[in-house]
Amino acid sequence: MAIGQEVTVFRCGSGHTTFGEPVNLFLVTDQHLIFTTNSGAIVKTRVNNLHQVVGKANKNRYVVSLKNIDQFQEMIREEVKFWNSKTCQFDKK
């Protein structure tokens, strides 16, 4: 993967519905690939396993795919949001 490469982050809803948005690879560390969405959310995966999402994105069951968002049929384009149990609302970061 190269810095700036666009992939897709999504989560599955009820039935076969998926919600997601495009993300770009922002930074590579020794342990993580760090992606940023157009809406400002940050999604981290293991450097040796793109499909092993960590942190808030993992808790909210997001998945990263190498496919471009246009390759997903009927995906609902929705900002990546994480549930904040302290404020009882969704946060983008």
Image: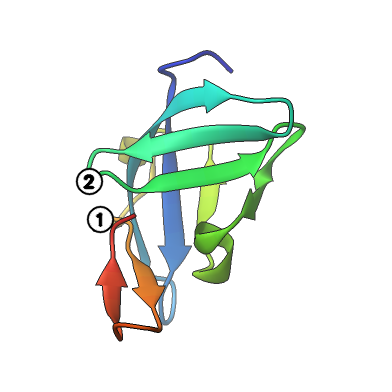
Q: Which residue is under mark 2?
A: 39
Q: Is residue 44 left or right of residue 82?
A: right
43 or 76, nearer to the observer: 43
- For disc 1, the neighbor class at 10 Å (few under 14, some 14 to 19, many from 20) is some
Instruction: Determine the residue positioned at 43% across, 80% down.
Output: 15
* Cβ atoms under marks 1 and 2 closer than 8 Å: yes
Q: Position of residue 28 (x, y in %)?
A: 59, 23
Position of the N terminus by quadrant = top right
Q: Earlier in the sequence, mark 1 or mark 2?
A: 2
Q: Quadrant of residue 69?
A: top left
> Which SS class for mark 2?
loop
Q: Position of residue 49 (x, y in %)?
A: 74, 38
Instruction: Determine the residue positioned at 46% across, 26% down.
Output: 25
Q: Which residue is under mark 1?
A: 79
Instruction: Determine the residue positioned at 43% across, 55% down.
Output: 10
> Which residue type does callout 2 highlight?
Ser
- For disc 2, the neighbor class at 10 Å (few under 14, some 14 to 19, many from 20) is some
Disc sitting over residue 2 in the figure: none
Position of the C terminus by quadrant = bottom left
Q: Can residue 67 be seen from the camera position used here?
A: no
82 or 10, nearer to the observer: 82
Q: Position of residue 30 (x, y in %)?
A: 73, 26
